[in-house]
Image: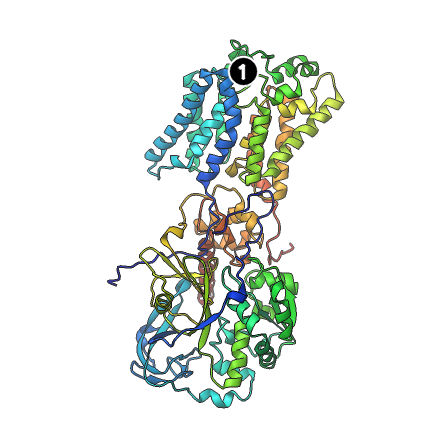
Amino acid sequence: MIKRPFFGFIKPEPIHPIPVHLSQVSMKEFLVPRRVTLFLNVAHENGNGFTIRVGDPVKTGQKLKASEGDNAYAISSVTGTIAGISEYIGYLGQTFTAISIDRAGEEQWDEAFKAAGETPSLDNALEFLGCLPGVTDFSALLNPERPLKTVVVSGIDQDLMITTNQLILKTESKRLKDGMELLRKITGADRIMIISPPDLCAEAGETGAEVKLIEPAYPNTLPKIVAKNVLGTVVPAGKRLEDLRVGFINAEAVLALANTFTDGHLPVTKVVTVIGKDLAPVHLRVRIGTHVGDILSDQGIEARHGDRLILGGPMTGHAVYSVDTPILHDTDALMIQDNSQIVSGSDLHCVNCGECVRACPADIPINILIRLLENGLYEDAVRDYDLLCCIECGLCSYVCPARIPVFHYVMLGKFEFARMESLEKSNG
Amino acid sequence: MGNERLFVGSHAPFWHNGSSITRKNYHMMLAALPAVFLGMYQYGMPAVGVLALSISFAMIWELLMNLVTRRPVGIGDGSAALIGLLFAMLLPATTPWWAVLVGTFIAVIIGRQIFGGLGCNPLNPTLVAVAIMTLSWKALLDFNGTLVDFDLGFNMIHPLAAAKGFGASVSAEYSTFGLLMGQHSGGIGTAFGLGLLIGGLYLILRGDIRWEISLSFLAGIFVTALIFNLADPQKYAGPLFHVLTGYTLIGAFFLLTEDSSSPVNFIPMLIYGLGAGVLTVLIRNIGAFVDGVVFAILLMNVANPILDKIRPKAMGREIEHA
C-alpha cells in the first residue's frame, strides 16, 4: 500500500505506479471459457421487440444486435448458442442487456467482416469496430460530422498497477506501426501521437507516431491531464476531448486494429492485468466476455466473503458484486482486494484540512464543493464551485483523512446534474 | 440470490493513503507533550490536576452531547481530548476546578458541538473558551496574580504584563535562552518555547499542520513588533521578545492551525497568518489586553470564509466577464 509522503509542506506528489519489470512479465493465453457474457448498450425492457432469442446459434466474431434497427452491437467471442438474455444495471444506473453465450462445438468464424476487412475506412470501422478492445467506444470517436484532428495513443495505462498497454508497447511495437497507419486511414487525423513512459521511448519511436514522453505517475496519465501537458489544450468544464476533436485510445486498440485487418477477423480477445491480493500483476489474454470467476479460479485466487472485486485499477475502477461479471472490451484490469486491505469510508463531516484541495490536479475547491454535494445542491456546485471541471482521478478520496467518499459524491453530483438538465430540456 | 458469498461494493478509489483524523489528533497531542511535561515539572501536582481535569471533562462533555443529540459517540477520535489538552496548556497551574469545568464546557459545547460537532466549528473552540473566561473572570488568567505563590527560581513576573506596564526596558530581564527554555511564567504549556518549536516542526514535517499559516503568523508578529520597536524603542519591546512570550508559539503551531477555522488555499493562508500576527502585536502594544493572541486568532477565524474565496482558477473553467 502506498503511504503518504513524510514531508507535508510540498504539494502532494503524484502517486507513482509501483514499478514492474516488464522483462520478467509474460502474457498467458487464457483458454476459451465455457460461457461468456456480453453487454449490449440497450435497455432490456423485458426483451420486447428483440430479434435475438435464447437458443440462437452464434459464430465467433458475429455481430449481435438486440433488434435490427439498433445501432448498438456486441461481437460474439465464442461459437455456441445464446443461453440467456437479461438486464444488467451498471455504473451510474446505465442499463445494459446482458447476453450469455454457451460455447458449443468447433470454433467457426463469422464471415461478414471478411469483405469489409479489405478496405479500412471510416464506414467499415463504424459498422464493425464499435467493440474494439482498449477503447471504451470507438464509434463515438468516429463521428463523421466531427472528424478527429489528433489521435493520442496511450502507451501507458491510466491507472496504477495496470501494465496492459506498457506490455503491448514493449512487445508489439512493429505491429503497432501497421496499426498506426490504419488508424490514420480510418480517422483521417493529421496528427497521431503516442505517449509513453521514458523507459519505452525506443519502442514508441518504432511505431512511427509522434512520440511524447510523460512521467509515469498518476494522475499524469489521465486523458485530460495529457491534453493539458502534452497538447497544451485545456478541456473546458463539462466538455469531452472528442468535442475538441481529439481522440484518446490505448495502444491495445491500435494493435487490435492491425491484427483485425491482417487476419480478417474481428478482435475477440482482451489483455487484462490481473492484480491479486499480493499485488503481483499477471497478464492474461482472455476472450472478451470471460467471467471474472473463471479467471480467478484459473489463477488460484480465492474470492472470499467480504473481499472486493474490482474491474479496472485501484483509483478509477468499479467494484462488482458477482463473480459472473464479464471482462468487457474496455476492462484493462481485474483486481481483488482481501477484506483486510479494504479501507472503508466514513460519514464524518469535512474538517476543512485542505488535503484534497492540495491534491486536486484541477484546482477545484473541494472543501466547499463537498458541503454542497452532501446537501444535494448540485446546481450551485456546478455554477460556483467547478463541479464539472473534475477530471475524475479520485485523489480527493485517496487523501481525505476523514475518509469521506468525495469522488463518489462528485460522480453522483455530475450524474444528478446531467439528469436535471435533460429533464429541464425535455420539459422546456 | 442464495449466494452466501458477498463482496464489498464501494466507489473508487479503492486505496487510501492511510491518514485519519484520529491519527492526526494523537500526533498533535504527542507534539504538545514536551511543553506539557515541562509545565508539569515546573508547577507540580496543581498542573497535573488541571491537565487531567481538563482533558477528562472535555471528553465527558463531548460524550454527553453525543448522547443528548443521539449522534455517534466520537470521543475516540481524540479531538475532544485535544481541545481539553490545549485548554489546560493555556491556563495557569492554579486554576480552580470549577473554572476548568466551565471552560471545557464552553470549548466543547458552545465552541463546537452546537455548530454540529467535529469540523463544523467556525472558531477555534479552545480559544472561544479562553476568550469567554478572560472576559468573565479577569483574575483567572492574570498570571501575575494566580502564580504569586510560586517561586521557580526565575523572574516570575509575566513578561508581556511587565512590558505593557513598564516599557521595553524590562525585556532585557528575560534572556532569549531563558524564554526558549521555559524560564518565564505563563500557562502550563505555553512557556517552553523550544518544546513548542520542536512540536510544531514535527507537525509541519508530518503535514498535519500547514507551514504557511505558522510561518506567516510568526512573520506577522516579527515585522509588526519590529516596526513598533523602531518607532519607539523605549516603549515597545523588540520582535524576538514578542515571538517568544505569551501564547505566540502555542498559537502559531497549535491554535491558529486548527483545521476547520483556518483557510486551505495558499494566499488565504498567508493573509490569515499575517493578519493574526499583526493583530496580536496591535492588541499587545496599544490594545487593552496583555496578550493579543486569543482575540487576534478569533478575529481571523471570522474572516476565514471570505479569505478562502481567493482561490486558483479551476482547470477548464471559463470565466464569464461581466
Looking at the image, which residue is at 38% across and 29% down? Answer: B61
Above or below, A341 against B210 in this view is: below
Q: Quadrant of residue B9?
A: bottom left
Q: Nearer the viewer, residue B37 or A21?
A: A21
Which of the image's four quarters has the N terminus of chain B?
A: bottom left
Q: Is residue B317 above or below residue A67?
A: above
The colour mode here is rainbow
Which quadrant of the figure has residue A389? bottom right
Left or right: residue A258 versus residue A304 is: right
SS at circle 1: loop
Q: Position of residue B302 (x, y in %)?
A: 55, 34
Amino acid type at mark 1: Asp
Indicate the chain on which mark 1 is placed. B
Give coordinates of residue B307: x percent, y percent. 60, 40
Whether residue B237 sits left or right of residue B196 in the image: it is right
Q: In this view, which residue lies farthest toward the bottom? A: A115
Task: Say above or below: A257 vs A418.
Answer: below
Residue at (53, 11) in percent of width and height:
B145
Q: Which residue is mark 1?
A: B142
Residue A212 placement (x, y as % from top left):
65, 66
B2 and A122: which is toward the camera: B2
